[in-house]
């Protein structure tokens, strides 16, 4: 349900009455609101925060604020499991803001989470471009790209990405 959102629940062909559908939508909205509260509380149980991550970002009217909530937990101060879940959730949310959050945070969260964020960025062409743009602007971020990922970019199917990678990585071993 989190992948289809409230609109999907409202329009899908569930064999339930309109009244049942309305109650289901309301219950899902209440669950998402509780998840937002849990996610925002650093003192909340870690497992509850990880579960909460999967329940945000699917209601159209809350996507923008939910992206910022997810950005807040992709941080070195967040428990690694919560940050990893947030990176996974951001990777499933389309749009430039989710990719921008991953680029902004990938260099600040440590090697394992940074690698996870880079993997998510490289899974989408528009985000790969965004990552390369950031590496051009701040070459220190190139350290996040190991040899295998550099090769992935050097062999990319999109000529623009491949050419930018060639310029960036020429002369690197």
Image (cartoon, grey):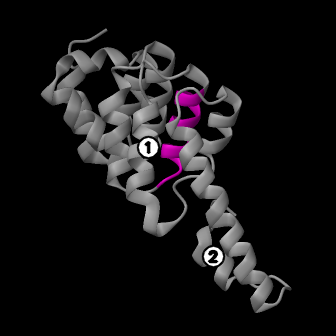
Q: Position of residue 12 (x, y in %)?
A: 71, 82
Q: Quadrant of the C terminus?
A: top left
User: Eyeballing the image, is 112 above or below 34?
Assistant: above
Badge 1 density bin: few <14, some 14–19, many ≥20, Cα 10 Å? some
How far apart marks 2 and 1 lie (CA) works out to 23 Å
- Comparing 102 with 86, the one in front is 86
The answer to whether residue 17 is visible is: yes
Percent across and percent down for residue 141 are 26, 20
Residue in the image at 44% along x and 19% along y = 77
Question: Which secondary structure, mark 1?
Answer: helix
| Magenta region includes residue 90 | yes
Q: What secondary structure is the magenta-colored segment mainly?
A: helix
Q: Which residues are magenta?
A: 82-93
| Quarter of the figure with the N terminus | bottom right
Above or below, 36 relative to 60: above
Please name the residue that numbered disc 1 is placed on: 69
Visible in this render: residue 154? no
- Vertical arrangement, residue 94 with respect to residue 112, above or below: below
Q: Residue furthest right?
A: 15
Labels in figure, total: 2
In the rendered image, residue 158, in percent from the top left (x then y), is placed at 33, 48
Residue positioned 51% across, 16% down in the render: 112
Task: Say which mark, if any, is on residue 8.
Answer: 2
Which residue appears at 55% of the width and 52% of the height? 56
């Amino acid at each position: 349900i989190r992948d289809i959102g409230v609109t999907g629940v409202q329009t899908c062909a569930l064999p339930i009455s309109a009244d049942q559908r309305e109650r289901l939508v309301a219950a899902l909205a209440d669950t998402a609101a509780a998840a937002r509260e849990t996610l925002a509380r650093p003192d909340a149980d870690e497992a509850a925060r990880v579960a909460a991550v999967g329940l945000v970002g699917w209601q159209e009217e809350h996507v923008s604020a939910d992206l910022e909530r997810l950005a807040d937990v992709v941080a070195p101060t967040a428990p690694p499991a919560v940050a990893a879940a947030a990176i996974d959730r951001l990777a499933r949310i389309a749009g430039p803001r989710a990719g921008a959050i991953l680029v902004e945070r990938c260099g600040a969260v440590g090697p394992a989470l940074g690698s996870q964020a880079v993997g998510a960025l490289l899974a989408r062409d528009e985000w790969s471009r965004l990552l390369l743009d950031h590496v051009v602007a701040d070459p220190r971020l190139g350290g996040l790209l190991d040899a295998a990922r550099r090769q992935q970019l050097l062999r990319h199917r999109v000529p623009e990405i491949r050419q930018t990678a060639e310029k960036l990585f020429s002369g690197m071993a």
